Image: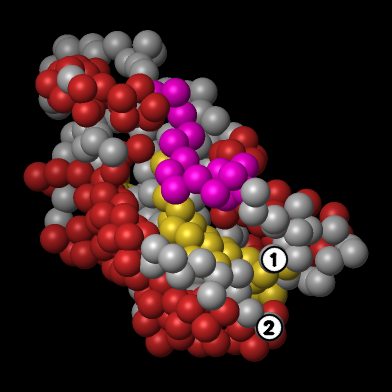
Amino acid sequence: MAEIQGKRVLITGSSSGIGKALAFALAKKGAVLALAARRAECLENVAADINTAFSHLPMPLVFPCDVAIRENVSRLIETSIQQMGGIDILVNNAGIGVYGNTEKTSISDFRSIMDVNFFGSVHCILEVLPHMKRKGQGHIVNIASVAAKHGVPYLGAYGAGKAALVALSQSLRAELSGSGISVVVAYPGYTQTEFFDKEKRVGGGRRPPGPYVSPEIVAKSIIRGIEKNRHEIVLSIEGKVLSSIQGILPRLADKAMARIAHRLREPKEGSNEQTKITDYRAFPEPGRE
């Protein structure tokens, strides 16, 4: 059982959504926090709220940072280690979204997704690994998506970036075997956050209706997985079903995704087509900063 109390934790994308919820849940467990995201004012507010709620802990450190820029990440990791005395847990949560038809997604959109959702995590991992290796222990927690388990309609770019992160995590886990460093992958489903308000819409598909799970529930599940030393944490019933049928009945998974694509497809302009989506059940992805 991994102990959270007293651990020094760096969370990217922690100004809202899952990252913010993780910050509060980890503070409740007694963790010492460093918070990073692009929105400085939001980060300051999160840190202040945590300090008010958990005044017995050190004030969370705040680092405005764009993880897509390697130099920024180098400063983030170096300063976090200097000011906290080390990093025991790295949570790679920063991410952006693009929603709609893959054919309508520009190459620049694909590159933006990869720069933040994949390379942003790569930057953090490569910077923190030497420190964790010297200590002989640590946790690297990568927040992926159920869309990385199987491609989800209208999430081509987003799912591809998260699938790359999953493959990297699996390779890294094998390479670090016996080092004392754990690599954890979390696969949230749809989560009620600001993520969907900020994502880019390219057209062709509609978001399914809720209800979506709260970020607080997702955060608790992720922390429970860390404590139990799980390698993979699948956080929705749909995700667990998808994981099961993908290996046993892959064609069934493909047919399910085809039905979802049809239900969420935007009607053509001038068409009387009405696609019912109120009964939608998806294999979705998380929302985050």
Asked whether residue 33 appears in the rendered view, the answer is: no
Label 1, label 2: how far apart the Cα atoms are: 11 Å
Q: Which residue is mark 2?
A: 85
Tell me which label, 1 or 2, sits earlier in the chain: 1
Please check the rendered image and state whether residue 65 is part of the magenta-colored stretch, yes or no.
no
Amino acid on which disc 1 is placed: Lys
Task: Examine the image and state in which quarter residue 263 appears.
Answer: top left
Residue 267, compared with residue 119, is above or below; it is above
The part of the chain drawn in magenta is 222-238
Left or right for 84, reference 205 = right
Q: Which residue is mark 1?
A: 7
Q: Secondary structure at mark 2?
A: loop
Q: Secondary structure at mark 1?
A: loop
Please check the rendered image and state whether residue 232 is part of the magenta-colored stretch, yes or no.
yes
Is mark 1 in CB contact (under 8 Å) with mark 2?
no
Residue at position x 29%, y 43% from top?
148
Residue 79, compared with residue 253, is above or below; it is below
Residue at position x 35%, y 70% from top?
122
Residue at position x 79%, y 71% from top?
59
